[in-house]
Image (tube, rainbow, N blue to C red):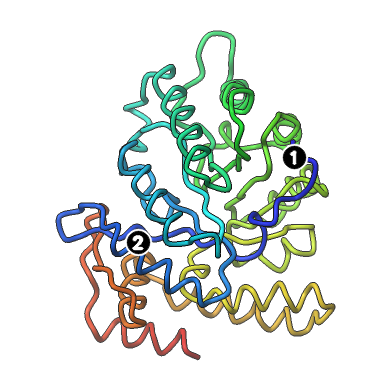
Amino acid sequence: MPDSLLPRFTGVIAPLFTPCDETGRLDTGGLRSFIRWLKGHRVNTVFCRSGMGRMYTFTLEETMRMAEAALEEADGEMGVVAGAAGIWDGRPERNPDPERYIQETLLLVESLRAMGADGAVLVVPLALAPSGSLDAAGVIYDYFAQVSRAASLPLLIYQPPGLPEACRMTPALLRDIAALPQIAGIKLSTGDPDYFASLARAAVSPSFAFITGNEALYLEGLRLGSVGVIGQGCCLYPELLDALREKFLSGDIAGAERAQADVHRALRAFKGLDAVTAGKQILIRRGVRMLPYDRSGTLPYSDEVIDKLEAALKR
């Protein structure tokens, strides 16, 4: 574990909506334009090949291209981390070969280190099924142990929402993984405040970045020792999330509570919408040079829908 908390793993970390053209082809020009916009909006670090960036749809080569473009555009003004798990389409009935998946992870982690990235993000390996004497927890621990012992780059664990219970972190498992070399933090995405609190109490330390992955719980996370947030709002209203943390740290709890209430209102504005597609359409209106497409197949929304969403976000 790193000796001290890494500053790039704190504050607002934007999980980039991956720009694509209408055919689904990666648009690195759009990615650069997005990062230029984020530079002026209190974002500390950008996260390529994120869950909101449709992480399961990209190849090794595309992931490296994303990271290269992000690092060049960030140019040291913001941190850059990237998803470095092996290639898998997210379908449990089509799990990859375990050895290949681990080797791809190691290749991506080393490539990111060579490029100068600030860290690599490893999703909890739902892609690897229990086998032999290892249950799901054993497979998860073994994966992080293999990668961390071979890596020379800080690693963030990413537990996305919706995992089967057997594949979710427990306090004991998180403590064991956090003790491995190079494991620097976790992004925990859950809407369950009790579960969130149990892992925060197990993992928060001066050298481990506990990052809130559901901005609806950001204030609660800060109270429990969370040091940052990764969520859709980091791409669309990062100043609000940064202000929430700033007010909390300055002792203005009433102000932090008002900011958290505004976050809840912003999240409700997206009810019934695909946040990535609608979010891209909002960003286009703000001057980001990207198209409102990705590999999900979701079609852009009408101007009327986006007008209503934009008005709600402004409020």
Question: Going from the N terminus, do you reach mark 1 or mark 2 first?
Answer: 1
Q: Secondary structure at mark 2?
A: helix
Q: Quadrant of residue 78?
A: bottom right
Q: Secondary structure at mark 1?
A: loop
Residue at the spot x=33%, y=75% of the render? Answer: 288
Horizontal side, residue 115 vs residue 277: left or right: right
* Residue 314 drawn above or below residue 70: below
Q: Residue at x 41, y 90 (%)?
A: 311
Would you say 281 lies left or right of 196 here?
left
The residue carrying mark 2 is: 31
Amino acid type shown at disc 2: Leu
Please tell me whether residue 162 is drawn above or below residue 110 in the rendered image.
below
Pick the residue in front: 157 or 66: 66
The residues tagged by marks 1 and 2 sit, at their Cα atoms, a distance apart of: 30 Å
Residue at 52% x, 49% y: name it.
81
Quarter residue 137 falls in: top right
Q: Residues within 10 Å of mark 2 (few under 14, many from 20)?
A: many
Residue closest to the far top: 132
Q: Position of residue 248 (x, y in %)?
A: 77, 74
Count residues near mark 1 (Cα–Cα under 10 Å), then give few for <14, some for 14-19, many for 20+.
Answer: some
- Give residue 261's mark: none
Give the x, y percent position of residue 6: 70, 51
Please state the total of marks drawn on the protein image: 2
The kind of residue on which mark 1 rests is: Pro
* The image quarter in which residue 92 lies: top left
Residue 20: image x %, image y %? 25, 58
Residue tagged 1 = 2
In the image, 103: left or right of 59? Answer: right
Depth check, front residue: 178 or 6 = 6
